[in-house]
Amino acid sequence: MIDMHSHFLPMISREEAFSVDAARAPWLAVEPGASQGQIMVGDRPFRPVYQALWDPAFRVAELDQQGVAMQIVCATPIMFGYGWEPARAADWAARMNDHALAFCRAHPQRLKALAQVPLQDLELACAEATRAKAAGCIGVQIGNHLGDKDLDHEQLVDFLIHCAEQAIPVLVHPWDMMGGNRMQKWMLPWLVAMPAETQLGMLSLILSGAMERIPASLKICFAHGGGAFAFLLGRVDNAWKHRDIVRQDCPRLPSEYARRFHVDCAVFDPGALRLLVDVMGDDRVMLGSDYPFPLGEQRIGALVREAAFLDAAQQRRILQGNAASFFGLPAATPLLQESTP
Amino acid sequence: MIDMHSHFLPMISREEAFSVDAARAPWLAVEPGASQGQIMVGDRPFRPVYQALWDPAFRVAELDQQGVAMQIVCATPIMFGYGWEPARAADWAARMNDHALAFCRAHPQRLKALAQVPLQDLELACAEATRAKAAGCIGVQIGNHLGDKDLDHEQLVDFLIHCAEQAIPVLVHPWDMMGGNRMQKWMLPWLVAMPAETQLGMLSLILSGAMERIPASLKICFAHGGGAFAFLLGRVDNAWKHRDIVRQDCPRLPSEYARRFHVDCAVFDPGALRLLVDVMGDDRVMLGSDYPFPLGEQRIGALVREAAFLDAAQQRRILQGNAASFFGLPAATPLLQESTP
């Protein structure tokens, strides 16, 4: 199995974070030798986490138990730093990407990294994506928006075009979730707003006509099964057919663009997975667990392995083959062997 | 067929609207005798509409063509008036409800009305719900939130308890959509934010524990197939299982509450409908078209009638029986006959 959606956060100290942005840079509060800790923002606990987040040896031991041959790690979105002035964000992104590569270095056949970029500055973002690729990152992760700029904004479209031209695969992750005051409890921003953010990102690319300008070679994947996209695509098609302002910038039926996108399979329900595979295609869904967070798939790949409606070839594609193809991983290396838990 | 989700807007004049709230009260701009018009808010066009919205005779002729035996009409959400001071909103709601009853009066076997209420004031809202029921409305429609108050807010829970105690069925409709500046084009508020609003309403009732206080007798239906709820329920269950702050106020697995809710079937895709029926149960999904708007089902009931995965008994339940039961309509009256287009 190749798990293409997992997060890390390096052992950033309070001092290091405060030297960048005392209010917004994340750091890790972990007692020496402890296996549990907290992601902190300023002096506020953000999320309880455990050793797999920062310790690659611990992580690989868990991957062994889970039967995961390779895992692709990327930043925890709170590390993005899109709100900072560009030079500071570029410096931070490069530092985080070096951390990510160091995280993977001890287990080069088991761990691969996606880079983060200073998305608020097109030139710096493109430069860091290219530099990180040369340094060993196998793709980039970006947030689904930048303040009021959604993925249809020229700056973000141009970044995606850069990635297409440089053959850099892109994972789009929801972050900075809409809803504000109305979602203060029960992780509602993760349960309601993240799937809406993801759908908004996909529809922004489709309905704006941006997908007509972006090269078909772009490899772009949306996290969490594309959020609410697959289930609501019928509503979007219906609106496109019957309301002029929906189709004004989009020449094709929205569902025709679904095959330009990949998604992970982190949907946690067999019926949802079946719909997702039907809508996106069994060549466009990839194992992604959201490990090592509590909202991730705790038995990585179990939903796919236990899906009776998928035949063995489809399961192999979703668990491994699609990600190998998406990220251009050599299909013959031992790391792509099937492992069993 | 009984279509339980459709909208009307009475022939409110500019003068009448401006006397209530020049900036926010809706009115209809229709040339005398014209079949097309605009919903206006202030002097801004809000939405192009056609005669079925305001003319019951025209509507019933369309229902004949569509084979719809009975249609339940409710306010277009822009009529809610939740932002006004309570007495003004109560007066407006009573006036709109009288319009709704007048709209149905010429075709009492074909058209039934849901009331609107001044939700910003619990006492007035309960009083209007009770008055409207006595006057002939067969239920109420409410928006899914009131500013920052979602459905878990004590005031809204108490209103729902009133409806349970008085046997008043409730349709919850998304409105006043989140997302703000980021959804200015392509009807994104209707495509992204409405389904998120609906899911937020359902999860606010579940995760807050409010469903433990609300009598099981409450009949409550969420529009547009419950928005993103059914597809994302697996994500919510997974979060509840693995993250303490998700389950802190909710004693049962979130999916256990799904059977306390009804939804309409306005999802526009066979795969989405199948998932919806699997998650909610074939006794909890009801025909609802969102007529007469372009984002509604243009051939009312076609998605259900053409769903090969539903047997004839299931189709009958969804097209008719469930709504008859939900609204307490006498099952033996001619209006419940099957019609064919």
Image: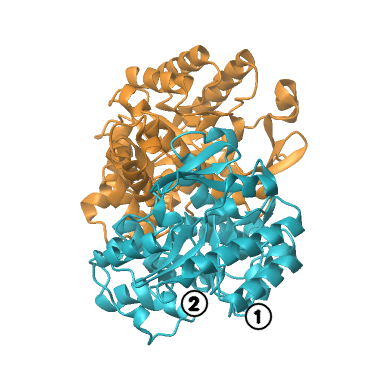
Chain colours: A orange, B cyan
Numbered tag placed on residue A225 in the rendering: none
In the image, what residue occupies the spot 44% across and 72% down?
B284
**Which amino acid type is shown beneath numbered disc 2?**
Phe
Tell me: B145 left or right of A300: right
- Residue A338 location in percent, x, y? 30, 47
Q: How many labels does the image show?
A: 2
Q: In this view, does A239 lie above or below A119?
A: below
Residue that numbered label 2 is attached to: B327
Task: Look at the numbered disc 2 and give the secondary structure of its residue.
Answer: loop
Task: Single out the residue that lies furthest toward the front.
Answer: B32
Q: Where does the C terminus of chain A fall, quadrant-wise? A: bottom left
Residue B154 visible in the snapshot: no
Subunit that carries the residue with mark 1: B
Q: Nearer the viewer, residue A14 or B297?
A: B297
Q: In this view, does A310 lie above or below B327?
A: above
Would you say A101 lies left or right of A160 here? right
The percent coordinates of residue A87 (x first, y second) are 61, 13
x and y, in percent, of residue A23 in the image = 74, 29
Q: What numbered label is drawn on residue B165?
A: 1
Which residue lies at the image location 37% right of the left edge and 87% below the top edge?
Answer: B332
Task: Label 1: state its secondary structure.
Answer: helix
Is B72 left, or right, of A335 in this rendering? right
Chain at numbered mark 2: B
Q: Are marks 1 and 2 in contact (CB under 8 Å)?
A: no
Residue B334 vertical placement versus A260 (above, below): below
- Residue A18 lies left or right of residue A164; in this view the side is right
Could you tell which of marks 1 and 2 lies nearer the N-terminus? 1
Instruction: Pick the residue in front: A98 or B194.
Output: B194
Q: Distance between the residues labelled 1 and 2?
A: 15 Å
Q: Residues within 10 Å of mark 1 (few under 14, many from 20)?
A: few
